[in-house]
Structure formats: structure tokens, C-alpha cells
Image: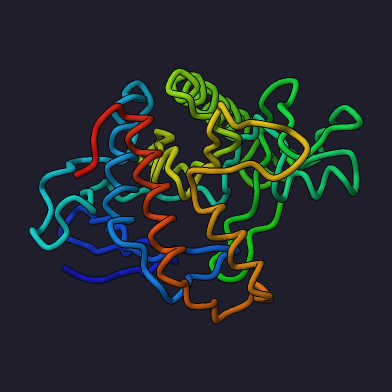
Amino acid sequence: MKHVHAGKVRDLYEDGETLLLVASDRVSVYDVALPTPIPDKGALLTQLSNWWFEFFADVPNHVLSTTDVPAEFAGRAVRVKPLKMVMVECVARGYLTGGGLKEYQATGTVSGIALPPGLRDGDKLPEPIFTPSTKASEGHDEAITFEDVVAQEGREVAERLRELTLSIYTRGAEHAASRGVIVADTKVEFGWDGDVLTLGDEVLTSDSSRFWPADQWEPGHAQPSFDKQFVRDWSVSTGWDKEPPGPEIPADIVAATRGKYVEAYERITGRGWV
């Protein structure tokens, strides 16, 4: 196998005509991979993503096999089709928080979409919105508008990206809600398999989404979470400037983070994590 790409969390290997996508235990916040791994994180992300790929079986995706992988990667790797990736991070938001909240507080809009006045951190939006961003190979992704996607990809493709993203978010959020989890927002990525727009990378994981416990949702402040927001909040509390290198994560934060990833997996899938 040929190692062809190392992302902040995932590694990509070329194996004949197919690719192996391997999720590491690295955790990335503010586009910086922190030096301390979270045990089992890669396997948890992979297994949750695989569960969602089955849930969204009607949406073409890149997965060829979840089991035909080298033994050393078992549980944390999938064999996938090579795609020509669309250079857009497709983000859907159903709740206002994070970077969307900051933009709204400054302009009253998110990615060019006007929102009602007076919204607070954690408020549910009138309807889910498509808020794409750039797909930066280095540095931070930047928010863009739907019309920016149109200019880059053409209107037909841009509308299909928006439609798929909002459908995946809405359907996934409805399922998660039935398990006591709010999906505040999520990021998905698409690529071309020939002329078929295809879901790639990961889907509705604790790294690509904000998961909140529904019974603790209380707009007006930051929400407790089942995702890496916990690590983001901790990293900021250290005084870190969000530039490489990131801070070492202490053992208690590592253990608590792993617990959140496990709980998200178990709640959403209904399966126990061993």
C-alpha cells in the first residue's frame, strides 16, 4: 500500500484501484491536530460513520467494504472508491452556535442568510440552513455563501449539494432526536464517482457534528456536548492561541472526551461499545 495523504485525523492509503481511509486517534480542534490521542476515537468515528452510511443507503457513498481491510486497521478503516472531491465543506445548521453565532452577532446573517433578530447561543433556527465553507488544505476553512458555491461549481451542482446536505442533516437529526440527542449542525463532503455525486469521508460523527443532550438543552449559553466541542472549550481555557502546536491534553480531559464519544455512539446506534 502507498500512503498518499495524512489529514488532521485520517490517513489515506492507495491499494490497487481502491483506497483505504484510516481514522486515527488524533483529535483536531480549530484545524490543529493536538499532540495527545484519544483512545478508541478512530474506531468510534469509523463505526458510527459506517452505521450512518447504512442508514442513508439511498444516498450514493464511497464505501466498498468495512471488513476487507488489513488486520492492523480493523475497526478503524474502510475500503472506499476514489472520488474527485468537490472543494466545498457542506455544512448544515439547525441551531445557532459556534462560528455561525459569531457571524450572526456581527452581521445578522450566516453565510449570507438573514436570520431573525434576537437569537441566542443554542437557539433553534426557523429551519435548517446550508452554510458552506472553503475546503482549505492548510490553515482554517472560511465561511462562504451559496452563491460562492454556484460560482465555483455551477448552479445545478450547488443546488444538489445544498439539497443533499440538508436532507442528510434533517433525516439524521430526526433519528438522533428519537434517541435524546440534538444534532446542532454537521459537515459532510461529496465527490464525483464518474458523473455521480457521492457522499465521502465521514457522516454525522462526533468530529463532524455538534451533538447535544436534548434533556439539557437550554439556549442562552454554550451547551453540554457529546463531541469534540468539549476539547475545543478546554483548549481555549488554557490560553492557547489556536495556532500550531496545540497543547497536550491532560489525562482527565482525555478520559472525559473518550466517554463523550462512546455515549454518542451508543445513544445514536443503540449498540453497546465494548
Q: Residue at x 39, y 45 (%)?
A: 202
Q: Quadrant of the C terminus?
A: top left
Q: Residue at x 65, y 50 (%)?
A: 133
Q: Residue at x 30, y 61 (%)?
A: 39
Name the spot of residue 34 as percent of width and height, x first. Answer: 48, 72
Q: Is residue 118 above or below residue 228?
A: above
Identify the image quadrant of residue 7: bottom left
Name the spot of residue 88 as percent of width and height, x first. Answer: 58, 48
The way the protein has been coloured in the rendering is rainbow
149 relative to 48 in the view: left or right: right
Name the spot of residue 182 as percent of width and height, x first. Answer: 55, 29
How many numbered circles does the render carry?
0
24 relative to 153 in the view: left or right: left
Q: Is residue 14 above or below residue 160?
A: below
Identify the image quadrant of residue 64: top left
- Looking at the image, the residue that sits furthest to the front is 252
- Nearer-the-camera pick, 215 or 22: 215
- Looking at the image, the residue that sits furthest to the bottom is 245
230 relative to 238 in the view: left or right: left
Q: Quadrant of the N terminus?
A: bottom left
Identify the image quadrant of residue 109: top right
Name the spot of residue 92 as percent of width and height, x first. Answer: 61, 35
- Nearer-the-camera pick, 196 or 204: 204
- Nearer-the-camera pick, 171 or 155: 171
